[in-house]
Image (cartoon, rainbow, N blue to C red):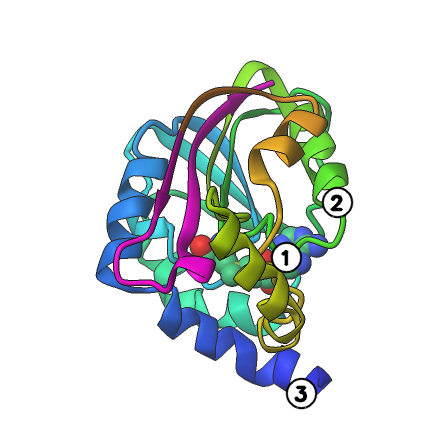
Amino acid sequence: MAIYRDRVFPRIMNLLMDNKQNRRIRARVCGDLEGDVVEIGFGTGLNLPHLPAGVTLLRAVEPSELGVHIARDRINSSPVPVQIVGLDGQHLPFEDHSADAVLSTWTLCTIPDAVAALREVRRVLRPGGMLHFVEHGTAPDAGVRRWQDRLNGVQRRLGCGCNLNRDIPALIQAGGLTISHLDTYYSPGEPRPFGATYEGAARA
Ligand SMILES: C[S@@+](CC[C@H](N)C(=O)[O-])C[C@H]1O[C@@H](n2cnc3c(N)ncnc32)[C@H](O)[C@@H]1O
């Protein structure tokens, strides 16, 4: 399982997460970022091409060594300086109130204690700083939720800890952040249990 997690899954993620629909979403979620930004679950750097010119530094937190290795070309061609500085969103190695914004794209599904990570996000954000997020999570429809619950065990194994059925808005609020806008939709082209999406921003 460690071989799959460390050597195989980051390559699968790099391919599956880089499609036209996701690129459109990334462009929206990253569009208003500025200043010193912390990204939790940097993955293979797929958000880098979408960072606007106003971002002065990206401090990336990512446990997968191979993910960061795959990101190298994207990091080298990014106009925004990138520092890989942490391994775990649950323990951010940053001073209180040191970030202008935090970015999380399809990561809160996987971090084991998402509320702990969100408390850390709140701690490192300057007052009024925003978490910009897109996450998949528990569906608005009961029938789809039942499928998510059935499929979650397999998803956790194949997706290296990824959960289909987390209540993303509730987690964000439990982390002490205030959601300022939220779009909830099924991502087009994806089976509904996998594509129930929460996109928005939350204030520290
Ligand atoms: C589905 S991938 C999304 C990657 C990337 N955010 C993207 O949009 O392509 C989930 C990411 O969360 C990372 N992750 C898992 N546990 C984590 C943790 N405790 N702290 C931070 N990131 C974590 C994984 O290594 C993986 O890169």
Please tell me which residue lies in front, 194 or 1: 194
Stretch in magenta: 183-204
The CA span between labels 1 and 3 is 18 Å
Residue beneath the point at 59% across and 77% down: 158
Q: Note whether residue 141 is visible.
A: yes
User: Where, by quadrant of the figure, is residue 2 drawn?
Assistant: bottom right
Q: x%, y% of residue 115?
A: 73, 38
Q: Quadrant of the N terminus?
A: bottom right
Residue beneath the point at 37% across and 74% down: 15
Q: Note whether residue 45 is visible.
A: no
Circle 3 — which element? helix
Please tell me which residue lies in front, 167 or 32: 167
Residue where numbered disc 1 is placed:
110
Reply above or below: 70 against 185.
Answer: below
Residue beneath the point at 62% across and 59% down: 163
Q: Is mark 2 within 8 Å of ligand 1?
A: yes
Q: Residue furthest front?
A: 143
Circle 2 — which element? loop
Amino acid at the residue labelled 3: Ile
Q: x%, y% of residue 180?
A: 46, 18
Instruction: Tell me: 31 left or right of 102.
Output: left
Report the disc number at residue 3.
3
Q: Quadrant of ligand 1?
A: bottom right
Residue where numbered disc 2 is placed:
90
Q: x%, y% of residue 173?
A: 65, 25
Circle 1 — which element? loop
Please tell me which residue lies in front, 19 or 40: 19
User: Where, by quadrant of the figure, is residue 95 drawn?
Assistant: top right
Report the disc number at residue 60.
none
